[in-house]
Image (spheres, coloured by chain):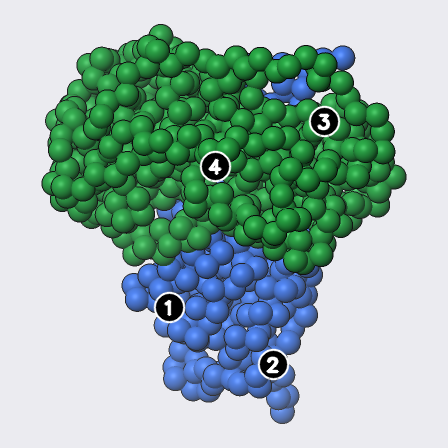
Chain colours: A green, B blue
Amino acid sequence: MSTTLDPSSSPSKFATERPVLEFGSAWEYAPSPESTDHVRIDKRYGLFINGQFVAPKSKKWFETVNPATEETLAEVAEAGEADVDAAVLAAETAYRKVWSKMKPAERGKYIYRIARLLQERAREFAILETLDGGKPIKESRDVDVPLAAAHFFYYAGWADKLEYAFPGKSAAPIGVCGQIIPWNFPLLMAAWKIAPALACGNTVVLKPAETTPLTAMHLAKILQEADLPPGVVNIVPGAGETGAHIVNHPRVRKIAFTGSTDVGKLIQRATAASGKRLTLELGGKAANIVFEDAALDQAVEGIINGIYFNQGHVCCAGSRLLVEESVADTLLQKLAHRIETLRVGNPLDKNTDVGAINSKQQLDKIRELVACGVEEGAELHQSACPLPKKGYFFPPTWFTGVAQSHRIAREEIFGPVLAVMTFRTPDEALEKANNLAYGLSAGVWTDKGAKIFALTRRLRAGVVWANTFNKFDPTSPFGGYKESGFGREGGAHGLEAYLEMVG
Amino acid sequence: MNLPVRKTYKLYLGGEFVRSESGRYDPLADAKGAFFANVSRGSRKDIRDAVRKAREAQPGWASKTAYLRGQILYRMAEMLESRQEDFIALLRATKKTTPAAARAEVRASIDRLVHYAGWADKYQALLSTVNPVAAPYFNFSAPEPTGVVGLVAPETPELLGLVSHLAPAIVSGNTVVALLSQAHPIPGLELGEILATSDLPAGVVNLVSGHKDELVPQLARHMDVNALALAGLPAELEIAALQDAAVNVKRSRRYAVADYTAAEAQGLDWIRPTLEIKTTWHPIGW
């Protein structure tokens, strides 16, 4: 790494032009780590097939690592073709014999049980998520796990009300659903996928990401505690190859994928001739547009939350800041100061704002793109915060002097890196915001109501936050336009992906 | 002696009737096998031009009020009604059919346009939700057009099939590049004259006649087409198109409609595939 990228360099020039905010620097910082005492991590996790943890026929195991310490947490079974086959068979049998025949209200009650068990064991899951994925405990505790439980609770209630969702139609389940989820919100994405699938009467083969399988494996234990009939949910960890086995399995009737646009395109191509149903939730490069009449301090909080939430490992992250030229200097000074206050470090510390980068591989990708930003001529700014010696960390980073054509303005970095650009008119802001193949989310900051709706209507994105950012709720449909994918998750619209309409 | 004036059948691109830029044509025989007309054989460049016109027209068309879009679709029905005898004659002249079948197809096409004219300001209410999020935010989800739709119209019924796929795509503010029936393109090209006189803005619908094996891949691979509707394509061409559609994550759907006059051949489910659902959040407070 070149010295210009050294995180210990001095704070951005924007930060030094004004007195720095006092955030308790007079006192020595006292860490406040969450205790991990009551979390038991197994040495090994088998595949979860037909209600049991079983050894993989592939005979392969992989290690899952704590990205904050680089220590191995556990060994996890890797599902090969025969394992995926067994999981699909279990799911199909459970679908035919049990789940599709069960009274919808009873189906719902199982899902309610899952929600409740998850609430009961919430703290344990939050700690596990933070250990395995590197996200700050305050996020796993206050966002990931409560939202996951809420998602189960929400869709549980739909199970016996599906006929109200699609008047004039009779909605039938599809069958075995293959679901492939990413590493950025491991438990939450599992909930987003499993809850609506089960509520609609389908059974599931789920593949968690290879760097973050632990909460999914513990969710399997909750499914056992809930007495969910064997085979209704099967969990088969692994990497891309395992995913391909699921995608190509002839008895899987529906694929739901959350991940990169590149892989999404491969899956769309692979399933094209199969008649399989498909929903894709892919990459993004959201524009966060700040007008001069916005409440700037609130906008700063929104920008911070937009890009540094979950280390920027968020498909809908506000990774492009478009700020109206007239307030650019003021806003960027405020932003620079605020960024200096972000605490980067031990994800288990309750005061940590930015945790560990999920994996070495992802850290390398972020470094590469940041180096590219410098090479292409953008001006780099990084927080002067100290980084832990061990583990995968990257300081909150932002670029000014960014052109639309720069890679850092066009490619999904999936890290704590913000590209700042300016505009003079709403039309220019819209043109810049929409001028990408992605269309997952966007943000608008202004105090004028009419302007909000003029903007939100013309932004080509599936989720638009006005005067807020990165908010999620099980009742609120989420999904992309253009190359950010198709289909919605959450809300009544989220049911469509898991039902076959008849008549 | 009074020599009939023959019509030159051209593509309909960006509101203009133009020959294929390639200069190519296909001679078309009438129902009895005699020469009927030289029809423009659209090229890949024509498809690209059509997509460009459709893209340019899309934001403007989508920003028209739903009421106006409904009236324009209704106007299309009015125009077709007043020229129905021409269309019946064309259907009869260009393929073997009975007078009753030709009349039925045109009548059904008119009714289909009226049906979708009524949808223009109604599907939104049925597909929108206000979402009770567990925090102080006003949150709602509503449909928007997906953008440019590539339509491969069925070989037959060449008029009703085209209208049945066209109307549900444009009613929500999408624009369309339609590849017409290869064997029977004339009624589809004639429909351009209805579109041109119905206050439908130029470029909202673009009609291309030509060879499907040449043009479908171009449409399916085009990076500025958002959705594909593939009707009655041979399996090989259809699968290739669905695979090609992945190049920019097109929303694609194949249709195998046995009876375009059936009740199932119209309705909300035909509008839905070319819609996107947008969710908007705003804080509540002061």
| A145 in relation to A420, above or below | above
The amino acid beneath tag 3 is Arg
Name the residue rendered at 31%, 47% in the picture: A240
- Please report the residue visible at 64 percent of the width from the left and 26 percent of the height from the top: A342
Query: Looking at the image, which residue is at 47% across and 64% down?
Result: B221
Quadrant the C terminus of chain A occupies: top left
Q: Look at the numbered disc 3 and give the secondary structure of its residue.
A: helix
Residue A474 appears in the figure: no
Residue at the image position 46 percent from the left and 59 percent from the top = B247
| Residue located beneath label 3 in the image | A338
Q: Nearer the viewer, residue B116 or B206?
A: B206
User: Would you call the spot at circle 2 few (<14 residues within 10 Å), some (14-19), or many (20 or more)?
Assistant: some
Do pointers 1 and 3 mark residues of a single chain? no
Comparing labels 1 and 2, the label whose residue is closer to the camera = 2
Badge 1 and badge 2 both on one subunit: yes
Q: Nearer the viewer, residue A151 or A457?
A: A151
Residue closer to the observer: A159 or A44: A44
Query: Mark 2 falls on what kind of element?
Result: loop
Could you say where residue B273 lies in the image, as x and y percent from the top left? 47, 45
In this rendering, the label closer to the viewer, 3 or 4: 4
Q: Nearer the viewer, mark 2 or mark 4?
A: 4
Find the distance from the CA under tag 4 to the CA under tag 1.
73 Å
Pointer 4 chain: A
Residue A124 in the image: state x and y as whole percent.
36, 14
| Amino acid at dot 4 | Tyr
Q: Could you say which disc has been placed on residue B21 in the image?
A: 2
Does residue A413 appear left or right of residue A83 in this picture?
A: right
Instruction: Tell me if residue B81 comes above or below residue A455 in the rendering.
Output: below
Of labels 3 and 2, the one closer to you: 3
Rounded to the nearest whole Å, what is the CA distance between mark 1 and mark 2? 33 Å
Helix, strand or loop status at disc 4: loop
Q: Residue under label 4, please give it.
A: A392
